[in-house]
Amino acid sequence: MISRSYANLLDLACANSEVMTKAKGRRRFPSGMTVPGNVARIDDGQANSVASENPSLVSGERMIIVSNILPLRAKRRADDKGWSFSWNEDSLLLRCKDGLPEDMEVLYVGSLPVDVDPSEQEDVASHVLEKFKCVPAFVPRSLLDDYYHGFCKKQLWPLFHYMLPFSADHGCRFDRSQWEAYISVNKMYYQKVIEVLIPEEDFVWIHDYHLMVLPTFLRRSFVCLKMGFFLHSPFPSSEIYRSLPVREEILKALLNTDIIGFHTFDYARHFLSCCSRMLGIEYQSKRGYIGLDYYGRTIGIKIMPVGIHMGHLQTVLRQADRELKVEELKRQFEGKTVLLGVDDMDIFKGINLKLLAFEHMLKSHRDWQGKAVLVQIANPARAKGIHLDEIQAEIEESCSRILTEFGAPGYEPVVFIHRSLSLSERMAYYSIAECVVVTAVRDGMNLTPYEYIISRQGITGAETGLNSSGPKKSMLVVSEFIGCSPSLSGAIRVNPWDVESTADAMNLSISLSESEKELRHEKHYRYVSTHDVAFWARSFLQDMERTCDDHLPKRCWGMGLGFGFRVVALDPNFRKLSIDGIVAAYCRSKSRAILLDYDGTLMPQNMVTKIPSTQILSLLNSLCADPKNVVYMVSGRDKKSLTEWFLPCKKLGLAAEHGYFLRWPQQEEWETYGQGSEFGWMQMAEPVMRSYTEATDGSNIERKESALVWHYQDADPEFGYSQAKEMLDHLESVLANEPVAVKSGQFIVEIKPQGVTKGLVAEKVFASMKEKGEQADFVLCIGDDRSDEDMFELFGTAVSKNVLSYNTEVFACTVGQKPSKAKYYLDDTAEVVAMLESLAAATSSVSSDDDAHISPRRFDRLVSLDN
């Protein structure tokens, strides 16, 4: 399938130079900058590299990690004079550097977790840059509400978790002012990044949905910047995502990176589906790597779930206060079997579903009454979420109901803790829990199970602690809708909406034999301990380097306005056809061959009516009228259609069905050039095609004299593409012993006789011209799909076959910038027509000049012709 992303590259035609200038240092801005800029003017920068005013302070490659919040903790000093900062040891982004090369410097760009007064911002910025290598972006309160609490938390977050605002009471409708605030804050982050950026050396790694349009701002200024993006939340299916009014702007912004990362294949698959359905871009898989071809750049798709930081958790396990907490909890829950839940308080964590399942377990498995306890830790909501009050009230009501029905003196079936716990406290609860239950209805990753597994493993070689020696065991009941679920193959996966099944899973998890629990734990620990955050960061960097290295040899241009901006990358040997160049070659030539495809070359693929316009017919007649020209329409269409459509063009040669039939200029009869006339294979192939047509809405069969074609351009893009691949294999198997070729093309699968190609048509035309003593010294060949590649391939051997000379000027041109054997390209059918009109105009100009100024030699020739 050819991407529609190749459709509009008109700006490239007039490009004077490559936009590959690289900055030589850093451009510095005031570190206290708070003005976000004019939202309406996101095009104020030019599509070239930003020059730097100051030299770099360091050398070598660096990684700039950009996230919504910096990995810092902040608190006001005791004297209320300034701020005290320290690393946030719980931040995964801080731990990314463990997977990066030791000599790679890491800088962080993001907001501080506290609101700093404008009068203190410059001092704070200088301090955190010098001490922590952090560049803070100070987002004004007026923007923060619309940006974070508005667009991020009330638009993107619900949508990415499959929640649509069907009514004003169920979600927030799209608000343009919030979208503009989102753009404005992303632009502020862009300004902060370029304060410290060294474009030719640095890698930029952008994290999460808060900064999804930042790549466009950076790419506008640095077309060759090495840039990656990782999404830590789910990516919804195309049916959900397409409801977002700014859906294409965000997709195109993400495609301005070099590599895009997701936790699971499901998330990546949904993103790829959106690119296919909304932008017409299909992905390809090569040697295990998935890529999207976007204007000549292959955008890598990375699938790698994030891990935990083993060293940090091991340090927490050694802390004395954890041991004290463990002993306290052991006494509190002595004789009880503890099931544990650790979740944020929001509507997607499924806390109440967990309570309902636990309640059902106590009812259906009465042996656990008085023994099983569910400890639910609910971290306070991070932002003003949707329906939080209702959810919290529902949870409290369920807890009260369970306590009333099953509670007894000395037995509290549900312990609900609604406050933030330190990692040390959480690890203590993990240590005494027989099973951790995660019933989120949608969650990007969720590292709670990973933390639990490490806690249950304990400290290797330690002599103290609950699980420091002896068999290790852990049990997990996890929702199938969370990102960590695929990697935990020993967990009991549940559909959290199915309360009864979840209750049975809870019962099973605490009822399994000790040996089974140990085996499951060993399997989990082996994975979690080897796929930690360092492994994740290292793997992402390696793929980013590989993808960026693939882009280095290409020539790059930046073009487009607003979020339509993109980088066009071309192979050094593949360039756009120069109109002036081909007109000049056309005018100085004496014998010309012009071979034109029809569909997708002169006629746009998306046109309902395929009949040529009067403009096209007039243009072809103008070219045919020049005695120096031999013009052929080389098409896959049947001869009946071509005969009717091009009836006014008497001097036009026609090749139908890829050259099976050929009609020479100024002749009525068609000649057959196929190897045989037996078409019994059609009776074998047509039933197969018919079965796929019946199963694929929007597809149809075209029957020609020599070929069968299955069209699926009106079918669902993904389903049609899948059916076409399946049909291709099916037909190749059925027709293995028949003298036919089965090939796929642009929205088609075609069966035709072997040996019939457009390349043979071109060879016949060139040989015919040579026999008449008019060997072509100018050849123009234009096509848009795979069948036309046979013509382009011929030019590599045409001289050795003696049908063209060394002096022949050949212009093999494909339509759309894509891999091709052609040396040139034009963007679309409009450019093809414009180019041919330029040639026709050159013909008219030369004819007019000849009529006005007839040379003596030309006069003698005309007289001899008259005689």
Image (cartoon, rainbow, N blue to C red):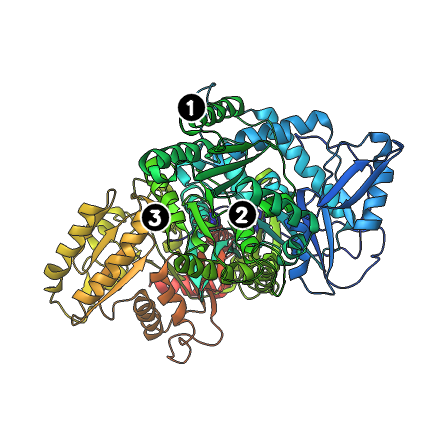
| Residue under pointer 2 | 432
Within 10 angstroms of label 3, few (less than 14), some, or many (20 or more) residues? few
Say which amino acid is labelled 3.
Glu
User: Which element is circle 3 on?
Assistant: helix
Instruction: Where is residue 603? Give x, y as percent.
Output: 36, 47
Comparing 446 with 676, the one in front is 446
User: Which element is circle 1 on?
Assistant: loop
Instruction: Where is residue 38? Give x, y as percent.
Output: 70, 30
Let me know if residue 257 appears in the view.
yes
User: Which element is circle 2 on?
Assistant: helix
Within 10 angstroms of label 2, few (less than 14), some, or many (20 or more) residues? many
Let me know if residue 17 appears in the view.
no
| Residue under pointer 1 | 166
Q: Between disc 1 and disc 2, whose residue precedes?
A: 1
Q: Between disc 3 and disc 1, whose residue precedes?
A: 1
Comparing 855 with 111, the one in front is 111
Say which amino acid is labelled 2.
Ile
Which quadrant of the view contains residue 667? bottom left
Distance from the alpha carbon under mark 3 to that under mark 1: 27 Å
Q: Quadrant of the C terminus?
A: bottom left
| Residue under pointer 3 | 718
